[in-house]
Image (tube, rainbow, N blue to C red):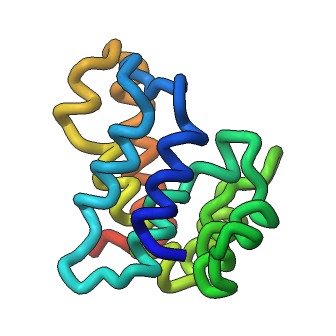
């Protein structure tokens, strides 16, 4: 699948959704794309656009495959899709095992942990999420500590 098609799908799928600050959710998708490294490939961009589609909308992985998602892209989207009642450690192991998913998850965390985004939240939510993203970085080996 091409990145522009993936972004079209994400825009439609996330239509009407908002983030924790009440802003349109698709803004998060665009920011994750912006956090990708300079050497990101089209596969990274496709997965970044679709990283929450299966988890947070009615769109399925099979539907994405039917729309042109490659096996490589599907494996990374699947790795990033947290299952109901799945322990976080299991989720992080699956993400870390897929090189594309790991790069996209790092960009996802970079956006979610952005101090400017956290600043608009109430203090309890801000502190809880900041700790969550620190733990996620550690679990994924994205920090030196």
Q: Could you tell me which residue is drawn at 68 percent across and 40 percent down?
A: 57
Q: Quadrant of the N terminus?
A: bottom right
Quadrant of res 143:
bottom left
Q: Nearer the viewer, residue 1 or 21?
A: 1
In this view of the protein, can residue 86 be seen by the observer?
yes
Q: Residue at x 33, y 55 (%)?
A: 32
Residue sitting farthest toward the top: 122
Relative horizontal placement of residue 62, taking residue 69 as reference (left or right): right
Side of 21 relative to 2 (left or right):
left
Instruction: Using the rendered image of the protein, determine whether residue 105 is visible from the camera's viewpoint.
Output: no
Viewer-proximal residue among 28 and 121: 28
Q: Position of residue 99 (x, y in %)?
A: 49, 85
* 102 versus 26 height, above or below: below
Identify the residue shown where x is 55% and y is 77%.
96
Q: Nearer the viewer, residue 36 or 144?
A: 36
x and y percentages locating residue 3 in the rendered image: 42, 69
Q: Residue at x 52, y 74 (%)?
A: 101
Quadrant showing the C terminus: bottom left
Q: How many marks?
A: 0
Residue 55, image x, y percentages: 68, 48
Q: Taking 50 as reference, is 123 above or below it?
A: above
In this view, 116 is above or below 114: above
| Residue 16 position in % (x across, y down) | 53, 23
> Relative to residue 44, is residue 93 drawn left or right?
right
64 vs 99, left or right, is: right
């Amino acid at each position: 699948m091409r990145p522009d098609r993936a972004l079209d799908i994400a825009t439609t799928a996330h239509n009407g959704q908002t983030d924790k600050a009440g802003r349109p959710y698709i803004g998060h998708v665009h920011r994750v794309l912006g956090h990708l490294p300079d050497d990101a490939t089209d596969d990274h961009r496709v997965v970044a656009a679709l990283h929450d589609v299966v988890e947070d909308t009615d769109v399925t992985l099979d539907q994405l495959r039917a729309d042109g998602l490659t096996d490589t892209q599907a494996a990374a989207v699947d790795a990033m899709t947290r299952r109901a009642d799945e322990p976080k450690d299991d989720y992080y192991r699956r993400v870390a095992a897929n090189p594309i998913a790991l790069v996209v998850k790092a960009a996802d965390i970079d956006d979610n942990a952005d101090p400017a985004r956290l600043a608009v939240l109430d203090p309890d939510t801000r502190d809880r999420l900041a700790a969550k993203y620190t733990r996620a970085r550690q679990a994924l080996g994205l920090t030196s500590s």
